[in-house]
Structure formats: structure tokens, C-alpha cells
Amino acid sequence: MQDVHTTTPAEPPGRAAVAAANVFLSPSRAFEEVRRGAGWWLPFLILVIVALVAAALSQPLQTAIAESRMAQLSEAQREAAAAQMRIGTIFGFVFAPIQVAIGLLLSSLVFLAVLRPSGHELSFKQIFTGQCYAGLVPSGIGGLVMGLLIQMKARSSGITGMADMPRLGLDLLGGEGFVRGLLSAFNLFAVWWLVVLVYGYATFVKRSPRQMAAPVLIAGVLWLLLGGALGGIGFAFASR
């Protein structure tokens, strides 16, 4: 009598393009692709490109801030400040990939510090890759939307400084300087990002989204507070 052995077919390898395309409407499917090996390089590259585009779209705001500061300087000081501004603009574009990488690394460390003690065995690589894909929502779509709104405002009524920056989050309730920068971190794109991470990390550990909701939300709020505080400092400095 001949033994019959049944074998489980091997899972197809994950595809980065499929994962990136599904992040917005089907995060569970997107992270299933990531679980099967879809790498972090494609969403990271997309985030870098978007960061460069958003920086270009935001130039009217940067120019307005620089001009308001130069108005208080002498003629000689203005020439030196203009040269520094041009160098700063170039440096800003060069620094964009580093800035994206630092943000993803720091957010991954925050999530690692919360998820590990809560009993969810996720590796740093899994968390970092998840941050790359989920980041397509706030840094990708959110960055482009903000850049486009700045462009529209610059063409319609003009921009004179940070006070004219569009409001998309809790900063709609008011506040200026540090407070406004902090509140602006909590917006629709941040909520969407958290939902993606809840479903995504639940897919990694094969648990229900409800089981993952509490630790992901805690880590997410901590990161938003940290990022909002840093943004608030920058907002307060630029508003001077």
C-alpha cells in the first residue's frame, strides 16, 4: 500500500507594488503582501519623492517667511541672507531622504517600545516596514494635499507667513505658535494612518484588529505627541 503525502502549496512571494496600492483601501491585504516578503524600499522611495514634491509645492510659504525676516535687515545683510536662503533651499531638498528615514526610524522605535511589552512579538524590521507602507497616508497623501493647498492659497490671496498655512487638523480649533504646531499633528490623515497600522500589525501577528487596537493607538498617540511637539517648536520658531 502506497503512502499518500499531502503538501501545503507554498505562499506566493509578497509584491511591494500590490502592497503599496492596497494600503489606502485594504490594509489587511497590503500587510499580507508585506508578511509574505514585500520589502520596504518601494514605499520609502515613494515617500522620498513625495517629500521632494511637497517641498517644491511649499516654496511660497518658505519664501514668505524668508522675505518677512529679510525686511528687518540692512541691504548688506539682505544679500547675505538671500545667499543663505538659496543654500538652505538646496540643503532642504538634499536632506529630504534623511528626514524621511529619521522619521520612520523614530516612529518604529516608539512602536517597538509599546508593542513588545504588550506581548506582541513583532520584529523591528516588521514594524519599520509597516511604518513605511502606512506612512504613504499621512506623509504621502497628507504631504501632497498640504503642498497643493499652499499653492492654491499663494495664487488666490498670497502668503505672508506661517499664519497663512492651511489648517487640516485640531489646529482648526485655534491656537498659534507651538500650540498650533502640536495640534496640527492630529488630523484626518493621522487617524487614517492609525487605522492602517491597527489592521496591518494585526495581520502580522494573526490576531483581530480589536486585539491590536489598544497598543497601536497608544504608540500612535505617543508618536503624534512627539512629532507634534517637534513640529510645534519649528512652527513657533518660523512664526517669529
Image (cartoon, rainbow, N blue to C red):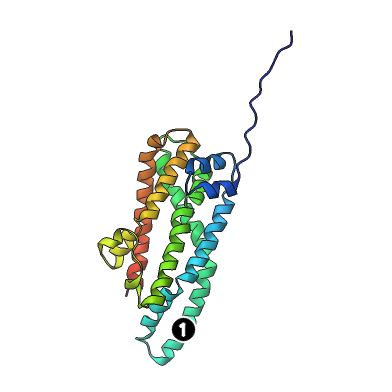
Query: In the image as oriented, which residue stretches furthest toward the left?
Result: 174
User: Is 184 left or right of 144, judged from the image as shown?
Assistant: left
Depth order, front residue of 39/80: 39
User: Taking 121 as reference, is 240 above or below it?
Assistant: below
The extreme right residue here reads 1
> Which sits in the foreground, 4 or 238?
4
- From the viewer's perspective, tell me whether residue 103 is left or right of residue 221: right
Q: Look at the picture and state if 23 lies above or below 78.
A: above
The residue positioned 56% from the left and 49% from the top of the image is 40
- Residue 3 in sight from this viewpoint: yes
Where residue 43 appears, as percent x and y from the top left, is: 55, 53
- Residue placed furthest toward the front: 156
Furthest residue toward bottom: 75
Q: How many marks?
A: 1
Assign a secondary structure to mark 1. Answer: helix
Q: Residue at x 74, y 11 (%)?
A: 2
Residue under the point 46% across and 56% down: 103
